[in-house]
Image (cartoon, grey):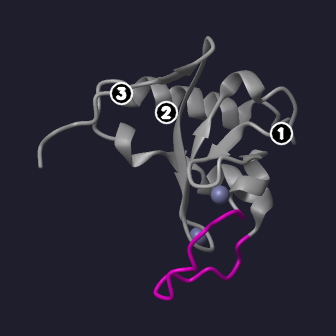
Amino acid sequence: SGKLPAHGLLKEGGRAGFQVEHQCLGKCQGLFVPAFYTQPDAPCVQCVECQLLFAPQKFVMHSHRSPDKRTCHWGFDSAKWPCYLQLGRKHQGTAEEAELKRLLDEMKEKFSYQ
Ligand SMILES: [Zn+2]
Ligand SMILES: [Zn+2]
């Protein structure tokens, strides 16, 4: 091991995105595209497995794997998606981690009016 993937930020037609993931009711990785997040229910996270786009609250309920039996999920509430959505592990421990975490926090606060 020791080889890092060559790609950093994914770019597509001038739109940049980065990897996010959740481990709720199964787990799933997706590509968050900030430019698509124009309203709270805007589909802006693309599942890396099926390529479908989901709004953040829908994405944390989306998975291709069955839930880990060791993980306790009582109290799961998709409205709390900001608590469940994390930066993708491929970005963790990299040079861009801090910047992407900041972008993710901005995304989580974008439509929160509390
Ligand atoms: Zn969970
Ligand atoms: Zn999927």
Mark 1 lies on a secondary structure that is: loop
Q: Which mark is residue 114?
A: 1
Label 1 near ligand 1 (CB < 8 Å): no
Q: Nearer the viewer, mark 1 or mark 3?
A: 3
Circle 2 is placed at which residue position? 101
Q: Is residue 92 above or below residue 74?
A: above
Q: Are marks 2 and 3 in contact (CB under 8 Å)?
A: no
- Write the residue at 46% across / 45% down: 88
* Kind of residue sitting beneath label 2: Lys
For marks 1 and 3, the one nearer the N-term is 3
In reply to whether residue 109 is colored magenta, the answer given is: no
Task: Give the class, few, some or many, for how many residues have Cα within 10 Å of label 1's Cα (few <14, many ≥20).
Answer: few
Residue 65, image x, y percentages? 56, 73
Give, as a three-letter code, the residue at label 1. Answer: Gln
Q: Which residues are magenta?
A: 61-76
What's the mark number on residue 7? 3
Answer few, some or many: residues within 10 Å of disc 2's Cα (few below 14, many 20 plus, some between 14 and 19). some
> Which quadrant is home to the C terminus?
top right
Q: Secondary structure at mark 2?
A: helix
